Amino acid sequence: MSSTEQNPAPTTRPPRVTAAAAVAGLEALALFAGGVYVLVNTLTGTPDDVTQALTGAATLIALGLIPLLAARGLLLCRSWSRGPAIITQILALPVAYTLLTSAGAAIPAGIALAVAAVAALVLLVHPATTRALGITRHTP
């Protein structure tokens, strides 16, 4: 059975699902940008540990794939996409807290990340979203 037979796309995607996909897409973009930034600084600068910096850059870029795939799945109204999207938001909350407890320009970034993560979580757990994604409650 193909994925389209399991969860056929609705005729119209609810705005909540589109908004959740947009948040996940922006988070993916931010992770990719952070990874590229670290990579460029590693290659053009003098990092303390080149291996660690390259590993950090690769990790950020790889982690950007999770919300990117989740965003695509949400846009296509695939039920599997809700799980990775929720996990991404839950993982974003401690990062936001860390940014909020630091100094300087990291504080506004922490505020933006916290607001985005909480907003996405609210959108993702809303009953209209679960219905649109074809997620049903199974009772024993």
Image (tube, rainbow, N blue to C red):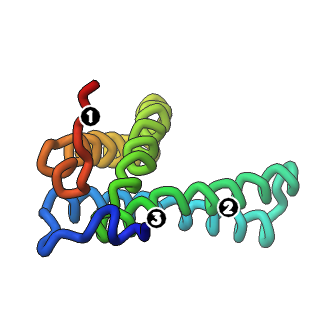
Cβ atoms at labels 3 and 1 below 8 Å apart = no
- Which numbered disc, 3 or 2, marks the residue that appears first in the sequence? 2
* Residue 82 in the image, given as x and y percentages of width and height: 35, 50
Please tell me in which quadrant of the rendered image residue 17 appears: bottom left
Q: CA distance from mark 3 to mark 2?
A: 20 Å
**Residue found at the far bottom of this picture:** 11
Q: Nearest the camera: 132 or 121?
A: 132
Amino acid type indicated by mark 3 = Leu
Q: Quadrant of the N terminus?
A: bottom left
Secondary structure at numbered mark 2: helix
Graded by Cα atoms within 10 Å as few (under 14), some (14 to 19) or many (20 or more), the crowding at tag 1 reads few
Q: CA distance from mark 3 to mark 1?
A: 29 Å
Mark 3 neighbour density, 10 Å: few (under 14) some (14–19) many (20 or more)? many
Q: Is residue 63 left or right of residue 121?
A: right
Distance of mark 1 from mark 2, alpha carbons?
A: 45 Å
Label 2: few (<14), some (14–19) or many (≥20) C-alpha neighbours in 10 Å: many
Could you say which is closer to the camera, residue 101 or residue 68?
Answer: 68
Q: Identify the residue position indicated by label 2 in the image.
A: 38
Q: Measured along the vertical axis of the image, is residue 129 above or below residue 32?
A: above
45 horizontally vs 125: left or right = right
Q: Position of residue 99 (x, y in %)?
A: 47, 38
- Residue at coordinates 29% horizontally, 69% vertically from top-left? 75
Residue placed under numbered mark 1 in the picture: 138
Residue at (24%, 70%) from the top-left corner?
Answer: 9
In the drawing, does residue 108 fall left or right of residue 84? Answer: left
Q: Residue at x 57, y 60 (%)?
A: 34
Q: Name the residue that disc number 3 marks.
A: 68
Between label 3 and label 1, give the one nearer the viewer. 1
Quadrant in the rendering for residue 54: bottom right
Viewer-nearest of discs 3 and 2? 3
